[in-house]
Image (cartoon, rainbow, N blue to C red):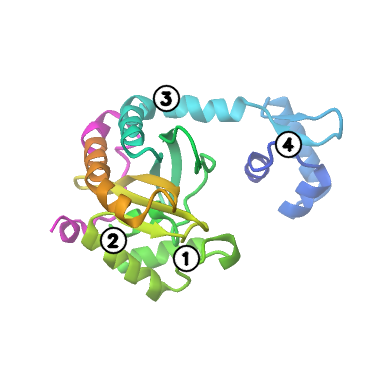
């Protein structure tokens, strides 16, 4: 699985030696595992360089799973409408245990700058709008536990205003709770802003988050405030429509702060 995760981040392929070194595996073991993955159809070897790359079997497997679980039928029309209304990138991320992962998106920008990161990545909890939208539904202890497990990451990899301490993060989350949705300005990346709201299921807490992201010059703080009602409405619609999907029925957050948020 670690080999698959590594190759998923390198669509042009990777050399055996580089993978073995990166994963701290003996080269013979790495070669044997790659041979097994090739036999099962998940990996192919590139003729020119001999590097290894993923086939489309694994992405197709994931897309088939999401389709069978009803994510596309339930969520896509809702995020499409929000993308049209906002003119920005709208994404849906699911809570899965201790992780928050993007699974669907809609691009509302028709021209000009577009912000469009890869799907399928785990959300960075400490400095993303989606991460904050999930964390703000949790107790301080649980939020701290999740961020500590994932880490704050290297400051150079994120925006100049990303929180780097738990104290700074908790202050941001308090402001988000009062507002009802999260807002970030140059926290995840320079020149980028975003907002997000949790999808709350009664008795289960947050099962997902829905986000809007775009360039700072267009998605300003004032524009995000204007989009707040539409974002919250979409999150509420997702919560009501999600009963048909087994993925949305999984337990989400602990829900200890939901009553506080509703007030």
- The part of the chain drawn in magenta is 239-263
Mark 4 touches mark 2? (CB < 8 Å): no
Q: CA distance from mark 1 to mark 3?
A: 34 Å
| For residue 93, above or below residue 64 | below
Report how far apart the C-alphas of labels 4 and 2 lie in the structure: 40 Å
Tell me, yes or no, whether the two marked residues, 3 and 4, touch with CB atoms within 8 Å: no
Q: Which residue is mark 3?
A: 67
Provide residue 81's location: percent of width, then percent of height: 31, 31
Q: CA distance from mark 2 to mark 1?
A: 15 Å
Q: Earlier in the sequence, mark 2 or mark 1?
A: 1
Ranked by sequence position, the earlier of labels 3 and 2 is 3
In the drawing, does residue 83 fall left or right of residue 59?
A: left
For marks 3 and 2, give the CA distance: 32 Å
**Mark 2 Cα shell of 10 Å, populated few (<14), some (14-19), many (≥20):** many
User: Does residue 256 appear in the picture of this structure?
Assistant: no
Q: Mark 4 or mark 3, which is nearer the start of the sequence?
A: 4
Residue 15 vs residue 92, the one in the foreground:
92
Residue occupied by mark 2: 176
Q: Which residue is mark 4?
A: 12
Distance (Cα) linking label 1 and label 4: 31 Å
Q: Is residue 178 magenta?
A: no
Residue 68 percent location from the top left of the image: 41, 24
């Amino acid at each position: 699985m670690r080999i698959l995760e590594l190759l998923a981040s390198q669509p042009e392929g990777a050399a055996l030696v580089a993978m073995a070194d990166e994963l701290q595996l003996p080269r013979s073991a790495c070669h044997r595992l790659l041979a097994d993955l090739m036999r099962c159809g998940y990996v192919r070897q590139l003729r020119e360089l001999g590097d290894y790359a993923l086939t489309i079997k694994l992405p197709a497997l994931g897309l088939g799973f999401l389709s069978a679980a009803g994510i596309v039928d339930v969520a896509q029309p809702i995020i499409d409408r929000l993308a049209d209304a906002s003119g920005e990138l709208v994404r849906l991320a699911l809570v899965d245990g201790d992780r928050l992962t993007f699974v669907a998106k809609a691009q509302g920008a028709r021209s000009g700058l577009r912000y469009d990161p890869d799907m399928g990545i785990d959300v960075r909890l400490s400095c993303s709008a989606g991460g904050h939208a999930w964390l703000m539904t949790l107790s301080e202890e649980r939020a701290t536990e999740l961020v500590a497990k994932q880490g704050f990451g290297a400051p150079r990899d994120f925006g100049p205003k990303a929180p780097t301490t738990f104290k700074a993060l908790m202050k941001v989350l308090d402001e988000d709770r009062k507002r009802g949705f999260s807002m970030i300005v140059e926290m995840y990346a320079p020149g980028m802003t975003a907002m997000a709201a949790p999808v709350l299921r009664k008795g289960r807490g947050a099962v997902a988050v829905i986000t809007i992201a775009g360039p700072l010059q267009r998605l300003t703080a004032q524009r995000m405030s204007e989009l707040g009602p539409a974002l919250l409405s979409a999150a509420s619609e997702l919560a009501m429509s999600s009963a048909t999907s087994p993925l949305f029925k999984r337990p989400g957050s602990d829900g200890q702060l939901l009553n506080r948020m509703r007030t």
